[in-house]
Image (tube, coloured by chain):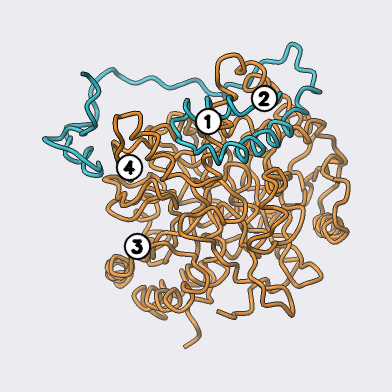
Chain colours: A cyan, B orange
């Protein structure tokens, strides 16, 4: 499988990364080189093989459903490029 | 007085306990060395001198009373991937500009609990994506090593290139590092240092900037096997804040270092004998086996048939997880924001300006393999291959193999700005061909310096162990270190 210029643009859009028209060809070449490299996985017979979900045998731990952390909104927003009254500020999203 | 920075971590620890010098003197010696070397080597992206001296002073107070933890007064460098409260934490990326976390990673908090002193934050490949430390927003780290008769700058490896270079060049007594596909072991091999990637789950991932969560594991880089074991004991342990942390007791790893290899079976995987492998790497590998046999180990030929598929499967799994993990960098919560005409425009412009080329490439590959219609063909397939890779190792261990010996890297360090590598992303990825299988299977692996190439550059061997059996790795690596009996330190030119 290989990607064309339209697919490169679509992927960049999905990834929310702006790319210039002038960059499309080089991204296309690099992505196709990587996809070409991973193509060899097609040789592997995986019939009846379960996909790995956890590298070590473990079950997710459970804990009591109670609040164990929090109550410091000012610390949460302290690194925000823009905040007001402990809210993150973003451009208007609802007209 | 001898140069305090040249002492091993273990020797410095003894000398501090004996009051031969103070933690303040030791920290001062490292800060002086960093000031002199960093303009040339670029190993540190932030030096926390004042904080280091305060921590050293607190250590001196404890040491004076005969108290203190296992690393009391030992100055360490911390990879920029670890969250350190109020201190530069940017994963060497532009997109985390100015980020100073409100929290401390579990691993660093354990090091400070045990008395260690933070010298500063170490350079790395951006978001740990790279094998040469050239993708850092802060520019490449320069290796303290040069080929004989050459002034050309070499890479220290990556992604933990700052950690490896700083340890090798005596700019810290030891360093934290992380390893997703080889990022501890490859730079350790390139710089004549010892680096261990522990078993997945041994060291908490909490507070460490995530790259590929099912593969990421932190560990130490140090100048000796014993030093690495001392650091690892402090860094390990169960953490309820990391859902994949292993609830297991932490052994005293340093106590295992001199245990020897008598009676152990060392596996030699035939698939690691790659076509075109340089003869010096092959020689090094045989030499390592001879050393282990001389100390009472037995060698067994084994097969890990899916080895060649580990790297392609990795380049699906790791970018997929990265594309998801790095979605959080959107110009809203921290770091860089580039304004746009609406919120989507802001996201796109911020991420375009904030991420470097390698990171963008991997996010895009990850986005593609997870996108509708491709998920089964790529991601599910790769995870099935991963099951087979892990089974290969289980089969070998079931045959009575205690540890597996392989080369750490296909070659010694290469030059900064290598054009052939820059032109072909896959060629750079091949650096991790011997290390990446270990991450895919969640196993522990250690790189230990074992010899030098024709140009005098360090070469390393890798030992791979059973899950949570890092002790055997320390013991076997110590035999290689002792048998090599070589000074792997660089000749200072900086």
Residue at mark 1: chain: B
Q: Image check: B19 left or right of B179?
A: left
Instruction: Tell me the chain of label 2.
Output: B
Measure how far apart labels 4 and 1 are at the Cα level.
Answer: 25 Å
Label 2, residues with CA under 10 Å away: few <14, some 14-19, many ≥20: many
Instruction: Report which residue position mark 1 lands on.
Output: B321
For marks 3 and 1, the one nearer the N-term is 3
Q: Earlier in the sequence, mark 3 or mark 2?
A: 3
- Label 4: few (<14), some (14–19) or many (≥20) C-alpha neighbours in 10 Å: some
* Quarter location, residue A55: top right
Q: Residue at x 84, y 39 (%)?
A: B271
Q: Say which of B435 and B275 sits in front.
A: B275
State the residue in front, A12 or B215: A12
Give the labeled residue for mark 4.
B338
Decide which of tag 2 and tag 4 comes sooner along the chain.
4
* Label 4 vs 1, first from the N-terminus: 1
Q: Earlier in the sequence, mark 1 or mark 2?
A: 1
| Distance of label 1 from label 2 (alpha carbons) | 12 Å
State if disc 2 and disc 1 touch (CB < 8 Å): no
Q: Is residue B204 above or below residue B232?
A: above
Nearer the camera: disc 4 or disc 1? 4
Location of residue B476 with respect to B441 vertically, above or below: below
- Residues under labels 3 and 4: Cα distance? 47 Å
Secondary structure at numbered mark 4? loop
Regarding mark 2 in the picture, which secondary structure is present there? helix
Chain letter of disc 3 in the image: B
């Amino acid at each position: 499988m290989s990607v064309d210029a339209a697919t490169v643009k679509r992927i960049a859009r999905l990834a929310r990364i702006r790319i210039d028209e002038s960059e499309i060809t080089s991204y296309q070449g690099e992505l196709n080189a990587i996809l070409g490299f991973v193509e060899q996985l097609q040789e592997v017979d995986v019939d009846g093989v379960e996909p790995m979900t956890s590298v070590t045998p473990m079950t997710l731990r459970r804990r009591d459903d109670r609040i164990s952390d929090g109550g410091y909104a000012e610390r949460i927003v302290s690194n925000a490029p823009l905040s007001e009254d402990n809210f993150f500020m973003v451009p208007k999203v609802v007209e | 007085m001898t140069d305090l920075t040249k002492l091993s971590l273990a020797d410095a620890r003894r000398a501090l306990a004996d009051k031969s010098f103070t933690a303040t003197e030791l920290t001062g010696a490292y800060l002086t060395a960093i000031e002199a070397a960093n303009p040339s080597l670029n190993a540190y992206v932030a030096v926390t001198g004042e904080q280091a001296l305060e921590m050293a002073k607190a250590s001196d107070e404890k040491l004076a009373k005969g108290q203190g933890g296992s690393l009391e007064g030992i100055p360490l460098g911390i990879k920029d991937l670890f969250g350190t409260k109020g201190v530069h934490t940017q994963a060497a990326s532009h997109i985390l500009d100015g980020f100073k976390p409100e929290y401390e990673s579990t691993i660093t908090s354990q090091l400070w609990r045990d008395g260690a002193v933070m010298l500063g934050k170490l350079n790395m490949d951006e978001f740990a994506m790279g094998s040469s430390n050239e993708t850092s927003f802060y520019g490449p780290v320069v290796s303290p090593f040069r080929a004989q008769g050459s002034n050309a700058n070499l890479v220290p490896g990556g992604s933990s290139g700052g950690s490896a270079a700083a340890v090798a060049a005596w700019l810290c007594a030891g360093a934290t590092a992380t390893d997703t596909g080889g990022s501890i072991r490859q730079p350790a091999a390139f710089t004549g240092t010892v680096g261990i990637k522990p078993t997945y789950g041994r060291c908490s991932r909490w507070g460490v900037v995530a790259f590929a969560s099912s593969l990421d594991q932190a560990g130490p880089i140090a100048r000796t096997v014993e030093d690495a074991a001392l650091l690892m004991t402090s860094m390990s342990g169960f953490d309820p804040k990391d859902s994949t942390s292993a609830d297991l007791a932490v052994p005293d790893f340093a106590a295992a270092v001199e245990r020897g290899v008598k009676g152990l079976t060392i596996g030699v995987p035939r698939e690691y004998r790659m076509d075109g492998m340089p003869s010096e790497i092959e020689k090094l590998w045989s030499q390592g086996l001879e050393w282990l046999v001389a100390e009472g180990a037995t060698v067994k030929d084994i097969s890990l048939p899916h080895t060649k598929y580990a790297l392609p499967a990795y380049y699906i799994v790791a970018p997929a997880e990265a594309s998801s993990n790095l979605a959080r960098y959107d110009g809203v919560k921290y770091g860089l924001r580039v304004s746009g005409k609406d919120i989507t425009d802001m996201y796109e412009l911020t991420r375009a300006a904030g991420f470097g080329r390698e990171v963008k490439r991997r996010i895009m590959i990850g986005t593609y393999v997870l996108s509708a219609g491709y998920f089964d063909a790529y991601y599910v397939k790769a995870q099935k291959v991963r099951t087979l890779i892990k089974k290969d190792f289980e089969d070998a261990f079931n045959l009575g193999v205690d540890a597996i010996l392989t080369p750490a890297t296909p070659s010694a360090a290469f030059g900064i700005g290598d054009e052939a590598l820059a032109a072909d992303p896959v060629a750079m990825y091949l650096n991790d061909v011997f290390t990446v299988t270990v991450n895919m299977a969640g196993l522990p692996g250690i790189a230990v310096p074992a010899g030098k190439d024709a140009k005098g550059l360090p070469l390393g061997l890798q030992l791979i162990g059973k899950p949570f059996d890092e002790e055997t790795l320390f013991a076997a690596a110590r035999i290689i270190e002792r048998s090599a009996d070589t000074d792997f330190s660089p000749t200072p030119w900086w």
